[in-house]
Image: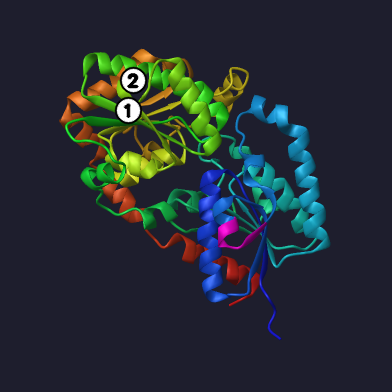
Amino acid sequence: MARRLRIGVVAGEVSGDRLGAALIGALRERYPRASFEGVAGPRMREAGCEALADIEALSVMGFAEVLARLPGLLALRRRLFRHFSANPPDLFLGIDAPDFNLPLAARLKQTGVPTAHWVSPSVWAWRQGRLPRIARSVDLMLTLFPFEEQLYRRHGVEAYCTGHPLADEIPLHNERAPAQAALGLRGGCRYVALLPGSRRSEVDRLLPRFLDAAQRCRQAAGDLVFLVPAASDTLYRHCQKLMVARGLEADTGCLLFHGQAREVMQASDAVLLASGTAALECLLVGRPMLVAYRVHPLSAPLVRRLLHSPFVSLPNHLLGRMQVPEYLQEDATPRRLADGLLALLQDPGKAAAQVAPFAAVHRDLKRGAADRAAQHLLEKTGFV
């Protein structure tokens, strides 16, 4: 009887859940009886991954935030190591969450389990000293962006760029009208998307400032309507409370949605968002944007010391210049955010100049990412 492919996988964040589900689908097309187990979100579970723990356990960012949840994270990692070392999979794959996954991969690799990681840590932006440890932890690094593959190969790590699944999913041209109709939005308005992040800590630090900026913008342009997609039901209720506390309800020009972040961006004339995967998605949708981010005050000084890149957002890294305005920490004030949004909304030429190079980046990242990742992983396990 043919050997059955079995993969252990640990994904972090909503974006990791999406990547994991696409990969499981690609592997199952080749090996329908393949099995998957690990840390999974709803998309991965729907694709057929047995969840040993829920993905929300890893949805934490920032040094101070991690410290508060460290005992639980370490206990989970020990539990996963015991499970996978007692029942060795053909391959262990970490998807994102590098600070959790790479130490786990290193220990499993020592027991003889082949290890891989998909979604490179941001070593090109900060903490490049991690590269030797990454090389000891994984047999294979799969990157989303071409410049990451080149960096790893220069440091002796086997690496391949898969491209980005979002570039495969999102059309090269995205009209506003169909998205507005799908969301039930009326005509005669200009829409602005507010995406404060997929973590509670991000929402707490950014959404109040985004909402205050929205109120400033509406004082200058009364035809603006702001759209807020909440990443989960829990965050929906939390966003609702923050909006009500500021007197922002539907009839005041601020609408809250269950998910539908992509449709909200497609429907909008401009986007204000937290730095992260959403900024890349906005680039692929082709909308002008402002990027903002704030970490815990205790985390900020250490982040500044470790950062060795002039940019934090993916669009600027991919283009190699400050194409998209970034508002970080103290700079992310409601006044500055409002001024930045109004500059894009009141000057169509400025907005058009920002998005002009986005299409070329989209075409470069459109490579059939899940299929490429599946092929490289199968070659590493010998299932080809």
Rounded to the nearest angstrom, the CA distance separating label 1 from label 2 is 7 Å
Whether the magenta-drawn stretch holds residue 46 is answered as: yes
Q: How is the image coloured?
A: rainbow
Sequence order check, earlier mark of 1 and 2: 2
Measured from the top left, where is residue 334 in percent x and y?
A: 38, 15
Q: Who's the residue at 51% across and 36% down the image?
A: 198
Measured from the top left, where is residue 91 in percent x and y?
A: 68, 64
SS at mark 1?
A: strand
Callout 2, which amino acid? Ala
Residue linked to disc 1: 226
Q: Residues within 10 Å of mark 1 (few under 14, many from 20)?
A: many
Residue linked to disc 2: 214
Residue 113 left/right relative to 193? right
Measured from the top left, where is residue 114 in percent x and y?
A: 70, 63
What is the span of residues highlighted in magenta in the rendered image?
Answer: 45-50
Q: Who's the residue at 37% across and 36% down the image?
A: 316
